[in-house]
Image: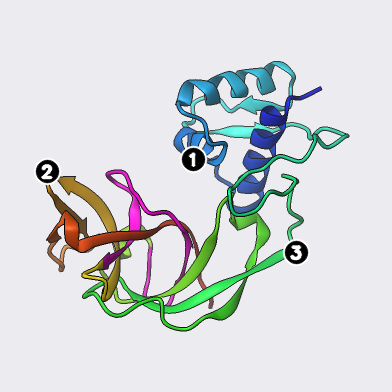
Amino acid sequence: MLTAKQHELLNFIHQRLSATGVSPSFDEMREALDLKSKSGVHRLISALEERQFIRRLPNRARALEVVKMPDIAAPAVAVAPMAARPVTPAAANDTIEIPLHGRIAAGTPIEALQGTEGFAVPAALLGPGEHYALEVSGDSMVDEGILDGDFALIRRVDSARDGEIVVALIDNEEATLKTYRREGQMIRLDPANRSYEPQRYDESRVTIQGRLSGLIRRY
């Protein structure tokens, strides 16, 4: 029988593999389960491996395979402060409606978070936490695979670590989607396109409004 945390991690891995075909990173697993360190994730992975629920694929980084799922669901687990709900595998055709807050620049900052339409998203693409969607405008993040017209799925957070792609609000007026870097008392927002220069601001001018958690592209 699995513990609640083991069951929660197994579901998270299963959902991510079903949605993207790629295993989540240890940092993503640590964050999804609200663990303080990656060592806790390693222990959970080892326990699931010993019980033959997952296996590691040889010669590939971040490669996990779900071998089986438990027959009986574990008790409901609170996975986010905004909403306590059971963590169960999302069916492929399940959708969740999240707010669509207009367009956000992946180039020169523009006004963002305008409008509150609904946007249907496959449930398997969303991890724990509160999310919203933004339509991407511009091409400054193309080297990260973020294209003009994509829909960015944003997990609402108010802090960031170096290297994370975030929604940064500048001077409480303009928002942009960039890679976050801290330089002392300055915040550097890096594009992923050599045609654009990094943007630097005093930390007092920048508010983090969310972190990129996924993309949806319509053809």
Magenta stretch bounds: 146-169
Circles 2 and 1: CB atoms closer than 8 Å: no
Q: Nearer the viewer, mark 2 or mark 1?
A: 2
Disc 1 to disc 3: CB gap under 8 Å: no
- From the image, tell me which residue sits under label 1: 28
Q: How is the image coloured?
A: rainbow
Q: Residue at x 21, y 70 (%)?
A: 171
Q: At label 1, which amino acid type do we have? A: Glu
Residue 46, horizontal then vertical, whole percent: 61, 18
Q: Is disc 3 surrounded by few (<14), some (14 to 19) or many (20+) residues within 10 Å? A: few
* 34 versus 40 height, above or below: below
Q: Nearer the viewer, residue 174 or 62?
A: 174
The magenta stretch spans residue 188: no
Please state which amino acid type lies under the numbered disc 3. Asn
Foreground label between 1 and 3: 1
State the CA–CA distance, disc 2 to disc 3: 46 Å
Which residue is pictured at 65% across the width and 25% down the height? Answer: 55
- From this viewpoint, is residue 191 visible? no
